[in-house]
Image (tube, grey):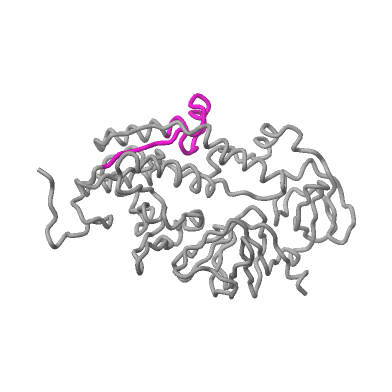
Amino acid sequence: MTATLTSATAINSLGFARAPADTRVVVAMSGGVDSSATAALLREQGYDVVGITLQLYDHGQAIQKKGACCAGQDIYDARQVADRLGVPHYVLDYESRFRDAVIEEFADSYLKGETPIPCVRCNQTVKFTDLLATARKLGAECLATGHYVRRVDGAGRAELHAGADPGRDQSYFLFATTQDQLDFLRFPLGALSKEETRALAARHGLAVADKPDSQDICFVPSGRYAELIERLRPGAGEPGEIVHMDGRVLGAHPGIIHFTIGQRRGLGVGMGEPLYVVRLEPESRRVVVGPKEALAVTEITLREVNWLGDAPLGEMPVAVSVKVRSTRPPVAATVRREGAGAVVTMADGETGVSPGQACVFYQKSRVLGGGWIARTRSALAAA
């Protein structure tokens, strides 16, 4: 017999007017504690849960990568969790798609002197495009993930909000989520802390309850990005000059892929004052350095802007707060549309802003979208 809803439970916890047993939910299961706890919570609430894990690397190589998402051990862990919960589990081979959409672009971005964020690209392409389409084909009402963000029903549309626990909030990495995707996505852990998530996993007897979090980019668990780039792009480590922003040549470097904006350590030059990487020039292979005050950026030009506000973003500035790195607190700014992109202006400036990273817009806890940093203008240039 089909389960029925009483008038007191006309809307289930995921926002659908049907009993949980009649609501199919695909859960993206990476093998970590967050996605495993998500599946356990939804199963506990009586939903028709289907677990899907994406194989993103060669299984034989990936199984050696401890702490790497969607590697061999993680696939095994996800399968064990699904068995424990009694839910069907499928592994989808997305190696080719992941390499083309994430890894190759990661390498190319470094060659351009940028500092990429592959986790955002993975969400934007593989997870929230390809996996979401697969969930629809399986007859799911929604795709649930273990991200620490909140989906709030606003005035006629779903809104994306920061996670309740500021220390775990992952909204910065989901700025590229479109409105159509947000309508289909659910984030059951958004109101929980990490400790509550681990306790939930332990209560269900999941072996991953104490599994450590991944610390590095999943396909570079060693953290040595330059080695991967040189393997993918032979010759990428071509040497060049380290130049002071006043034009003085201070030394040589082994390749711009070894440097990021704001870097101080490992420059190999000394002038009796702290120097920081303020600009990378891939065409001339120059690393430009200068004093800390040269890092302050007041204006950012963005490309590939995703806007989630209620009204369209226009040419008139909109007051927002922005984050230019996931670990930085938001700062007051304005954003306005300019051509196919947008321009963000910050009165007090921000440091360490690098092309290739993301600038994410907020109004209080709500995410209004964001874009990829294409160019920056320093406070010194504006003076």
Where does residue 239 sit, x and y in percent of width and height? 82, 40
Q: Residue at x 55, y 74 (%)?
A: 318
Q: Residue at x 60, y 41 (%)?
A: 223
| Image mark count | 0
Residue placed furthest toward the right: 248
Vertical relation: 317 (above or below) 136: below
Where does residue 214 sit, x and y in percent of width and height? 49, 43
Residue 209 shows up from this direction: no
Q: Name the quadrant of the C terminus.
A: bottom right
Residue placed furthest toward the front: 339
Where does residue 105 sit, x and y in percent of width and height? 62, 42
Q: Depth check: give the residue in front, 161 or 19.
A: 19
Q: Quadrant of residue 179?
A: bottom left
Does 302 lie within the magenta span?
A: no
Q: Quadrant of residue 108?
A: top right
Q: Which residues are magenta?
A: 49-74
Residue 71 shows up from this direction: yes
Residue placed furthest toward the left: 1
In the image: residue 315, left or right of residue 250: left
In the image: residue 12, left or right of residue 62: left
Q: Residue at x 33, y 37 (%)?
A: 207
Where does residue 144 sit, x and y in percent of width and height? 35, 48
Q: Quadrant of residue 378?
A: bottom right
Does 59 lie within the magenta span?
A: yes
Vertical relation: 186 (above or below) 246: above
Q: Residue at x 21, y 59 (%)?
A: 11
Q: Name the quadrant of the N terminus.
A: top left
